Each structure stands twice: as C-alpha cells, then as structure tokens.
Amino acid sequence: MRYYPVSLDVKGRACLVVGGGAVGSRKVETLVKCGAEVTVVSKAFTDELLVMGEKGEITLVSRAYSPSDLDGKFLVIVATDDQAFNEGVSRDAEKACKLCNVADYPSACNFILPSIVQRGDMTLSISTSGKSPAFAKWMRRQLQEQFGSEYGEFLKLMGLIRQKLLAEAHEPEAHKPLFEALIAEGLLACVASGDEAGADALMTRVLGEGYTCGELAFTMG
C-alpha cells in the first residue's frame, strides 16, 4: 500500500491554492467547508471565487505565483492547466516541507485527495491510488445512493450519547458494548424513520433512565 490513509484537520490553518479556475474553485470550496484559512494566488478567478473573496471567506491575490507564497502555509494545492508550472510549484513545496497536491497528477503530489461522500460527520472516501479517478467517481455515486442524510443525524445522536456517558463515572471501555447494542438493535432505523418513541425506548433499555431524545436535546427529522 503506497498511501497512508489519514483525515487531516485544517481548521484555522493557512492553506494555499495556486490557480483560480474551475478546478481550483472546487478545491477551495472543500477547504473552506473544513474551516481552513485559504489564500488563492492567480492572475484570474472564477465568479465563485470572486464572490467568496468579496464576502471575506477567502483571500485572493491577483498576480503570478511566487515561492514566497508558501511561507507560513500548512498545505498547498496546485490547480492550473500548465503542467510544467504545476510541477515547479510542487518542487518548491517539497523543498519547503509542505503538504502538496497537484490536481490530476499524482506523481507530483506528496498526498492525494480521495473522492468523498459527506453525511454530516460521516465521511466516506474512495481512493484508487490515482489509477482511475473515473471509477472513484462512479463508486461515490453508488455510495451517495446507499447512504442518506439519516446517517449524519444518527451520528449526531450517537455523539450526544457519548458526551453524556463521558460526563458520568464510566470507564470509556465500558461504553463499547453499549454503542454496539444501540447499533445492533436498530437505533439507526429509528432515526431514519423518525420514530422518536422507538428511539427513546431503545436508548432507555440499553442505557437506562435519562437517555431520551428530549433529554439529549436531539430533534428527530
């Protein structure tokens, strides 16, 4: 296995995108959703990036790239249509010990980006190690159909349960069979169908008193 799977926390971190076209826009959108502080360097920008810049969501630098743009950056994404230029930025990033991804060119990257399906706090990622992005996209469509928004809601409820359990005098290891029972006995199905009474009965049976949707401040649907 060549690539080490990891979920990277970029919240509040300075990230650089070189290239203001359609591909760069998609990369910027994902970084912003993850809470990154994004600077985009390009001689031209898409309308979407211009709007984000006007709103103060990102910083736009309207000029040619300079190696000094890497200073203070945690992560770099290169997304122009000039492959020789992209490779040059990648070499600069490597020398500066930066995480760097070059769109659609795995050999110039020290990390690659998977195709993802997001359902609240649940992230499903598909990687073909750069062999077939088309197949990764096809797999993503299959997973989008299979996993709906109920999975995000279910995780929200499970997070509230975990938070309450951790606040009580329990050993964390003791929580594992409780969560396994909630899953095995159908809490997800209750959330998917909006069956609050069923969820309350199940949680009370497994966890005891004090664990209902109302007491956890969880709203069905």
Image (cartoon, rainbow, N blue to C red):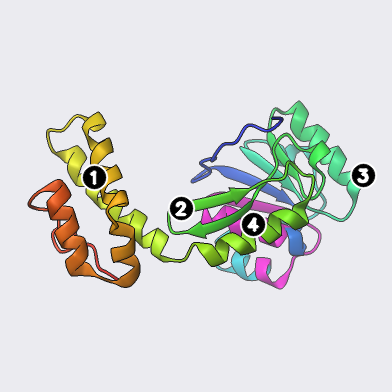
Q: Is residue 67 left or right of residue 218?
A: right
* Mark 4 vs 1, N-terminal side: 4
Look at mark 4 in the image and give the residue it sits on: 28
Residue 181, percent from left and from top: 26, 46
* Mark 3 vs 4, N-terminal side: 4
> Around disc 2, counting alpha carbons within 10 Å, would you say few (fewer than 14), some (14 to 19), or many (20 or more)?
some
Residue 174, percent from left and from top: 21, 32
In terms of secondary structure, where does tag 3 sit?
helix
- Give amino acid for label 3: Ala
**Are discs 4 and 2 less than 8 Å apart at CB?**
no
- Give amino acid for label 2: Met
- Determine which of the numbered discs, if any, sits on residue 122 in the image: 2
> Around disc 3, counting alpha carbons within 10 Å, would you say few (fewer than 14), some (14 to 19), or many (20 or more)?
few
* Mark 4 vs 2, N-terminal side: 4
Q: Which quarter shows the N terminus?
A: top right
- Residue at mark 1 to residue at mark 3: CA–CA distance: 50 Å
- Residue at mark 3 to residue at mark 4: CA–CA distance: 22 Å
Which region of the structure is painted magenta?
24-49
